[in-house]
Image: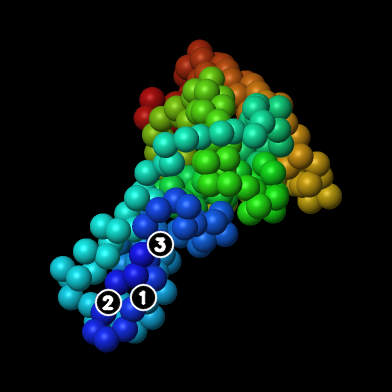
Amino acid sequence: MIKINIGRKKYKVCNEWKDLTPSILHTIKSIEPIELVKALTDIPEDVIEILSESSLMAIYQLVSFVEDSPKVLAPKKVINVASESWKKLESTKQALQTKSPPYIATQVAGIYFGDEVYKWSIPLVYGQTSQILESLFVFLERYKELNEGGEYDEDQLEAGVEGFETFGVGAIRYSLAKGDVTKYKDIEEQTAEDVYFTLLYEKAVNKYQKELKRIYDRQNGINSSKNS
């Protein structure tokens, strides 16, 4: 922790990992310079807003270390995301969309360990999240075919298939529960492996049925698709 002068006042600036706690890291949802300065100093926002660009960037250089990981990482436990709940996996994927390493580190560790992560050391938080993400990426690579659906054809577009994209994970949950809302929680607690295998199997079945219908239609002289 260091102090800097702005005008006639002194302000505290976090410039080392030892200055931080998981709670502070969890507030950093953006690594834009001005956001990092707001999160890692006690400079009032109204003062930050009127800083010159050069002054802001000078302070940013002091706090930008949080864009990288600590040099020492120490995971608490080996987590296999495939055997953990599907909900945790999807929540982890959502956390990654923030693209802010400090927030991701605490959020992902928290998804699997709860509020106890706020009592951990910074190396432990980052080490655990690093291990979880490694397991996640290995898992998603095994099921990458689920994301290789290709473009929609004209019939699907005319029917409004793009409208379903806004429902995201909710649409998957609805489909697996066959519309029964009383089963939603049970679906969320199923292992990621079971859910992804089911989705992959259903995709294969749908592809087969669609191809079989196309063959039957062709044999009967029916043009079943505008792209045929």
State how far apart marks 3 and 2 are (Cα): 14 Å
Q: Amino acid at mark 3?
A: Met
Horizontal side, residue 227 vs residue 136: left or right: left
In the rendered image, residue 41, in percent from the top left (x then y), is placed at: 39, 69
* Number of numbered tags placed on the structure image: 3
Residue furthest out toward the right = 182
In this view, the residue in front, 191 or 208, is: 191
The residue lying at 38 percent from left, 80 percent from top is: 44
Q: Position of residue 156 (x, y in %)?
A: 47, 40
Residue at numbered disc 3: 1
Which image quadrant: the C terminus?
top left
In the image, residue 195 sits, relative to residue 27, either above or below, namely: above
Residue 128, horizontal then vertical, whole percent: 58, 36
- Which numbered marker is on residue 5? 2
- Label 3 crowd (10 A; few <14 / some 14-19 / many >=20): few
The residue shown at (56%, 54%) is 22
Cα–Cα gap, marks 3 and 1: 10 Å
Q: Amino acid at mark 2?
A: Asn
In the image, what residue occupies the spot 18% across and 75% down? 52
Question: In this figure, which residue is indicated by the disc labeled 1?
Answer: 11
Q: CA distance from mark 1 to mark 2?
A: 6 Å
Q: Identify the amino acid type marked 1.
A: Tyr
Q: Is residue 130 above or below residue 61?
A: above
Disc 1 to disc 2: CB gap under 8 Å? yes
